[in-house]
Image (cartoon, rainbow, N blue to C red):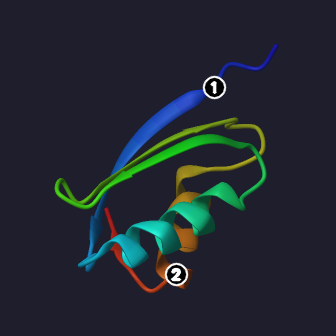
């Protein structure tokens, strides 16, 4: 049984629900990602993932490829 990690990333540049959908889709497409919750109001993405299949850098890269900045 693999232990899942959860990380909360600040996402900059989201201005609408379309942005939320883009970030959610980009993160969900990564191998090992189990759940994604993106909040437009808070400007955050909470991601539960398998650290043996994805890293926090992978998550940030996916957000960048969707056109947003994260930290």
Indicate the quadrant where residue 69 lies.
bottom left
- Dividing the picture into quadrants, the one containing residue 11 is bottom left
Q: Nearer the viewer, mark 2 or mark 1?
A: 2
Which of the pair 52/15 is nearer the observer?
A: 15
Quick check: 19 left or right of 41?
right
State left or right for residue 30 relative to residue 68.
Answer: right
Spot occupied by residue 66 in the image (x, y as percentages of width and height): 52, 81
Name the residue beneath numbered marker 2.
66
Residue at the spot 48% in from the left edge and 68% down from the top edge: 21
Label 1, secondary structure: give it: loop
The outermost residue toward the front is 17
Binning the other alpha carbons within 10 Å of mark 2 as few (below 14), some (14 to 19) or many (20 upward) gives some
- Name the residue at the right extreme: 1
Which secondary structure lies at badge 2?
loop
Judged from this view, the residue extending furthest toward the top is: 1
Q: Give the total of numbered labels.
A: 2
Q: Nearer the viewer, residue 7 or 14?
A: 14
Q: Nearer the viewer, residue 24 or 10?
A: 24
Which residue appears at 39% of the width and 76% of the height? 19
> Which class describes the residues within 10 Å of circle 1: few (<14), some (14-19), or many (20+)?
some
Which residue lies at the image location 60% right of the left edge and 68% below the top edge?
26
The residue that mark 1 highlights is 4
Q: Quadrant of the C terminus?
A: bottom left
Asked if residue 61 is positioned above or below residue 37 in the image, the reply reads below
In percent of the image, x 72 and y 58: which residue is there?
30
Q: Is residue 41 above or below residue 36?
A: below
Marks 2 and 1, how far apart at CA: 24 Å
Which of the labelled discs sits on residue 34, or is there none?
none
First in sequence: mark 2 vs mark 1: 1
* Relative to 31, 27 lies left or right: left
Residue 57 in the image: state x and y as whole percent. 55, 60
Residue 48 image position (x, y, % from top left): 55, 36
């Amino acid at each position: 049984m693999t232990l899942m990690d959860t990380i909360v990333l600040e996402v900059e540049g989201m201005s609408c629900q379309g942005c939320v959908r883009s970030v959610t889709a980009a993160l969900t497409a990564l191998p090992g990602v189990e759940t994604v919750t993106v909040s437009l109001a808070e400007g955050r993405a909470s991601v539960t993932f398998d650290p043996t299949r994805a890293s926090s850098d992978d998550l940030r890269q996916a957000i960048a490829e969707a056109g947003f900045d994260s930290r």
